[in-house]
Amino acid sequence: MFVPLTPLMLAHIRDNMAHFKAPKSVEFVEELPKTATGKLQKFRLREMYWSGWKKGN
């Protein structure tokens, strides 16, 4: 589920971190992909984020 940041949320984030690090949007998922040992599978998160995008120069 894609959620655009509200001005209030964005102001709070920018007060507490550098502006270039502030996210432009937030996406909520039901469950984070994890390994059998409980580690986060970052490559699966990247796949979910980049699905539909074409890689290349």
Image (cartoon, rainbow, N blue to C red):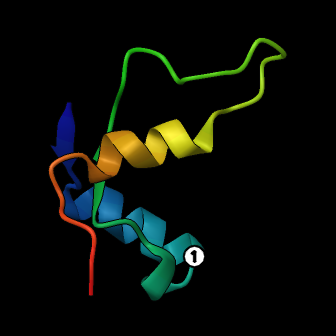
* Residue ID at (28%, 66%): 24
x and y, in percent, of residue 33 in the image: 55, 23
Q: Is residue 41 above or below residue 42?
A: above
Camera-nearest residue between 7 and 45: 45
Q: Is residue 35 above or below residue 19?
A: above
Camera-nearest residue between 14 and 34: 34
Work out which quarter of the rendered image holds the N terminus and state it: top left
* Residue ID at (27%, 88%): 57
Left or right: residue 26 compared with residue 15: left
The residue labelled by disc 1 is: 17
Residue at the farthest front position: 56
Q: Is residue 12 above or below residue 40?
A: below
Q: Quadrant of residue 12?
A: bottom left
Residue type at numbered disc 1: Met
* Residue ID at (20%, 55%): 6
Element type where label 1 sits in the image: loop
x and y, in percent, of residue 51 in the image: 24, 46
Camera-nearest residue between 18 and 28: 28
x and y, in percent, of residue 11 in the image: 35, 70
Left or right: residue 1 compared with residue 9: left
Instruction: Sort mark 1 into few (<14), some (14-19) or many (20+) by Cα contacts within 10 Å.
Output: few
* Residue ID at (18%, 59%): 53
